[in-house]
Amino acid sequence: MRQPLVAGNWKMNGTRSSIQELLDGVKGGMGEVTTAEVAVCCPHIFLADVQQQLQGSAVAWGGQDISVHESGAYTGETAGGMLAEFGCKYVIIGHSERRSYHGENDQTVAEKFAAARKAGLVPILCVGETLEEREGGITEEVVGRQLDAVVSHCGIDTLAEGVVAYEPVWAIGTGKTATPEQAQDVHAFIRARIAAANSAVGEGMQILYGGSMNAGNAAELLAQADIDGGLIGGASLKAADFLTIAKAANA
Ligand code: PGA
């Protein structure tokens, strides 16, 4: 049985006071979240605040990106060891916004996955196709390639130590969610692709859906056989909505 995981991706949002209120709200509602694990991935500048507020609670936290390097002259970057020092459990790897705005290619993403594992963090590997790729009928080719890059660089056993998030780029922040069937199809493809390398790893892999998942559509998406949770952007900025999603993942 795969444990559901609902992870918030705050992206570049929040202030020191707004996140305090948000986390108070999330912590306050955790009593009703019985099965799912809940995590928030915050802007790195807020990590000390988040750690202080969540330490000892049922909510885990993580970063949104990681450097491929361990230390050195890499202005603006955050090393895995630094994320670990602030108590991060998770780190998002290869989010489509990193891939498109920061030129991260499959190789960089694979190196970041390895860097996360080296620092003892659980990577949340994002994969997903653009609208053009979906319309061109190459969704599986694209998602397969993104997965294979990590498996060939890190090995299937290392992939097993992470989480995969399927995030169709056309559904992120657009309010346009994949239908439960569309999402399930790609999730089943991802699981089969991983299972082809190692069936136990495929079976055990947590595969999250991300892309305009919200309090209204979460239950239907999370009811799909191969959807094990969500990576939530906009809706993770409101405690009540985020908790509704986490509760929907309980079942
Ligand atoms: P969204 O973002 O829920 O705002 O669409 C999801 C993500 O980018 O992780």
Image: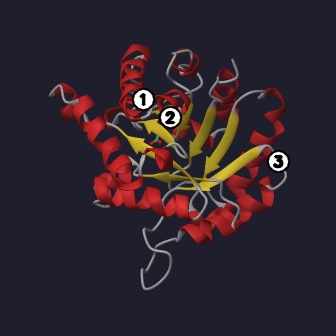
Label 2: how many Cα within 10 Å (few below 14, some 14–19, many 20+)? some
State how the image is colored.
secondary structure
Q: Position of residue 228 (x, y in %)?
A: 56, 27
Q: Residue furthest left?
A: 136
Placement of 183 over or under 149, stated as above or below: above
Q: Please, what secondary structure does the residue beneath circle 2 have? A: helix
Q: Please, what secondary structure does the residue beneath circle 3 have? A: loop
Residue type, numbered disc 2? Val
Label 1 and label 3: CA atoms lie apart by 34 Å
Q: Which residue is mark 2?
A: 201
- Which numbered dot is residue 195? 1
Q: Residue at x 32, y 53 (%)?
A: 99
Label 3 and label 2: CA atoms lie apart by 29 Å
Q: Residue at x 33, y 60 (%)?
A: 108
Placement of 12 over or under 9, stated as above or below: below
Residue type, numbered disc 1? Ala
Q: Earlier in the sequence, mark 2 or mark 1?
A: 1
